[in-house]
Image (spheres, rainbow, N blue to C red):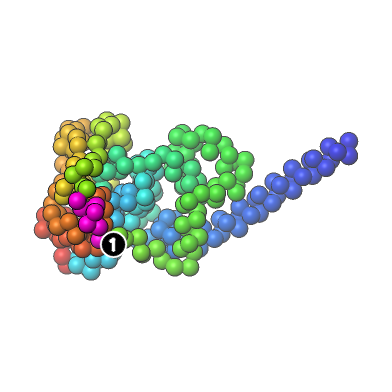
Amino acid sequence: MKKLYWILGLIALYFIGDRLVGYFFQQQIEKSQFRYSRMYAGNGEADILIVGNSRGLNFYQPYMDSVTNQNTFSLCYYSMPPEMAIVMTKDYIDQYPKVKKILVELTLIEMSDDKLLPGFATYMNFSPRVDSVIKVKDKQSWNASQLSHLFRYNNEVFQRAMYYRNKLDDDWYFDRTITEAFIQDAPNRSVTFKVNDTLIRQLAEIGAYAKTKGIEVYYIMGPFFPTYPVHNLDKLLARFTELTGYPVINYSRSIQDPYSFTDYLHANLKGGRATVDLMIKDGILNVQ
């Protein structure tokens, strides 16, 4: 009997410790300057919202802010799962209905990583939508996060939030220039897009939801390195418009200067400015 009491006592101690440390981590998340913490804490109001994976960083925010005289906010994250981008965008619209424009980088459909989904358990307390996505897509992780609150913070997203605990996360940009070796090897590398009708329809939810709030949405294919082969791109863009009715602004080959890139997929600051200039030229962004 005494052994049983010891076991029960240890279980209770673990449970109490788990909840106390989890509560402490939750407080740190709420105070972080990381983008999702700021959004859910009520400090994310902007005129222009940017949604995407790391290629969404091609839409260089500081330059966009300065030339449009408007504020921007980014929900971009490396290999962002599209389902998470969709629900976080809806959360943003609900919390900041005065946002005027949303720019969606279209490779969310293709260049994502579902292994990142459990990391967003860090924010499941803030959003029933985030909670629901994890529950549906990764039930095992969702169950673990219910059993142990510490599980919600054992991930990359929490680590980034802690890194930006006391400083603003305004340095997520690619300021390197691609190497000569990479430039020469570009034609020998490639990426092939699949055409996933389910993900295309899901990404269209952003436009449909924003439309109910009177918010403009633009789906944009950002630039790729000029000599880097991208297969099935035209098929993907055509299918997206066919299924959703939304045209795609295609900047995939709009920047021909190789020194405007940091690698085959990402513009550097020079290329980011050039991408913003293209959006101004095409009337997507307005200079005020």
Is disc 1 placed on a helix, strand or loop? Answer: loop
Q: Nearer the viewer, residue 231 or 52?
A: 231
Q: Position of residue 172 (x, y in %)?
A: 35, 60
The answer to whether 206 is drawn above or below residue 60 in the figure is: above
Please name the residue shown 58% across and 39% down the image.
Answer: 144
Please say whether residue 273 is visible from this viewpoint: yes
The answer to whether 108 is drawn above or below residue 283 in the figure is: above
Please name the residue shown 25% across and 61% down the image.
Answer: 177
Look at the image and tell me in which quarter the N terminus lies: top right
What is the magenta range? 176-184
The verdict on residue 182 being magenta is: yes
Amino acid carrying mark 1 in the image: Arg
- Extreme residue in the left direction: 281
- Extreme residue in the right direction: 1
Please name the residue shown 25% across and 32% down the image.
Answer: 195
Say whether residue 104 is left or right of residue 135: left
Q: Position of residue 158 (x, y in %)?
A: 50, 54
Please name the residue shown 65% across and 50% down the image.
Answer: 19
